[in-house]
Image (cartoon, rainbow, N blue to C red):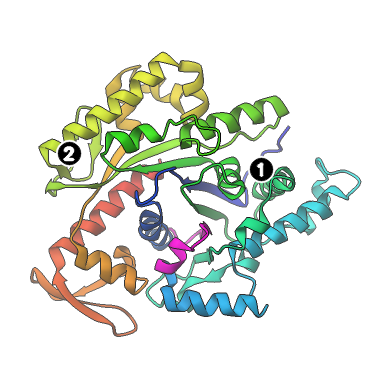
Amino acid sequence: MSVQTKNPLIRDSFTFGCNKGGVGKSTLIFQFAPAFAQSNPDVNVLVLDLTLTGNTSTMIITHDQMLAVKDQCQRADLRVRASDMLESLRDFAVHAKNRSSWLPNRAWFSKNKFDFADHALRVCEHASSSPDNLFLSVGSYDIRQAVEYDNWSDMVEAWQRTGRSEVDPDSKPWVIFFDTDQNVASPHAQFALRVSRKLVVPVGLSEMDFERCFEQDEIEPGVFHMLRLLHEEASKSGRSDPPCRLHQLIFNRVNKRTNDEVESGGISSPFTPTKEDLAQCGSLADRLYELVLNSPETARLLFHELDETFEEHGRTAGAFKRRYFTAFQNGASNPFNFSQRHGAPFACIADEGTGDSSVVRLPNGTASTFNWGTLRTLRENTTRVLAKLML
């Protein structure tokens, strides 16, 4: 049985997962994690990049910076890759299990906590526009050797025990953002799904891509099928901490009609999509709601706070879609490219000037000129979607 603490070391955790590549998992983490860190200085925010190619890492500290960091890691000058963190977690699990009492042995854990900051970059030291409470564990191909099926269970146990431990009075709690590859059946993706609390699934508006999330293939399962299997395994093993549950499904790269917030067909969007895209969002959401009605027991496993949502707002399609769906807009390429190329999320870019076409400048002096109104709406979109994630 898990021991609950008043001020746990991990305050919250989110896995961005989908078995379809190119839906924007890494791009959204790149925008959301720094924005959350900037507006919540009382916590440390860790981006744990569990992608083989370091998708989020490349954006947060830029490609050149990431290559330099990886080179230092290869020389053992740094240990800030996600694989370094998880290898240390594996060693921590071995030492913990060798104690006379693995569960609970609280005295040993109080003196031997796993410190996330030991295996993460403080991002502001590499990207000056970032808040000083944002940390990054860099993604790399080495993650495949760090997490394997034979050590997976112990690492899950070590992470969960650490996350439940009491945060030191002079330290900050952590909020974790996990980025994952499209292969949700890989050990490292399963690790993220197993130890985090909330699943965020970005999807496009393609019906085929949406259906792939439910694929029951043994080798390349859909994210919802993989999540169900993990819940069933956790139930059989008697583990007290369940895997994550679906918290938000984000329709990404939705075409915008106006900047006004809208609720249509139950879906709450921070902007007004085009009529065609709004109708498609509603149609796909209705299909997921039908699955919930047809398989209520499975739905309780997969959805975060489903019973509470229905109890408070009624068992209706509107209540369901209002709770679990939102959208992120398809913006102009110039702000996105500038943001990603310089490791500067929208929330961290300051503008100079009051006109629609304004100079935006980073703390290092890098500047660009584009429509400030466009950037402002992207920042507002980020803020509004982030507010839904933090429900």
Q: CA distance from mark 1 to mark 2?
A: 44 Å
Which residue is depicted at the point 47% across and 37% down?
Answer: 223
Residue 22: image x %, image y %?
35, 52
- Badge 2 marks a residue whose secondary structure is helix
Identity of the amino acid at label 1? Thr
Q: Earlier in the sequence, mark 1 or mark 2?
A: 1
Does residue 275 appear to the left or right of 122 in the view shown? left
Q: Pick the residue in front: 349 or 218.
A: 218
- Above or below residue 294? Residue 75 is below
Q: Residue furthest top?
A: 294
Q: Which residues are magenta?
A: 40-59
Which residue is depicted at the point 73% across and 55% down?
Answer: 90
Res 250 quadrant in image: top left
Residue 323: in sight, yes or no?
yes
Residue 245: image x %, image y %?
50, 34
The residue carrying mark 1 is: 5
- Badge 1 marks a residue whose secondary structure is loop
Q: Pick the residue in front: 351 or 326.
A: 326
Q: Which numbered circle lies on residue 277?
A: 2
Which residue is depicted at the point 44% across and 42% down?
Answer: 19
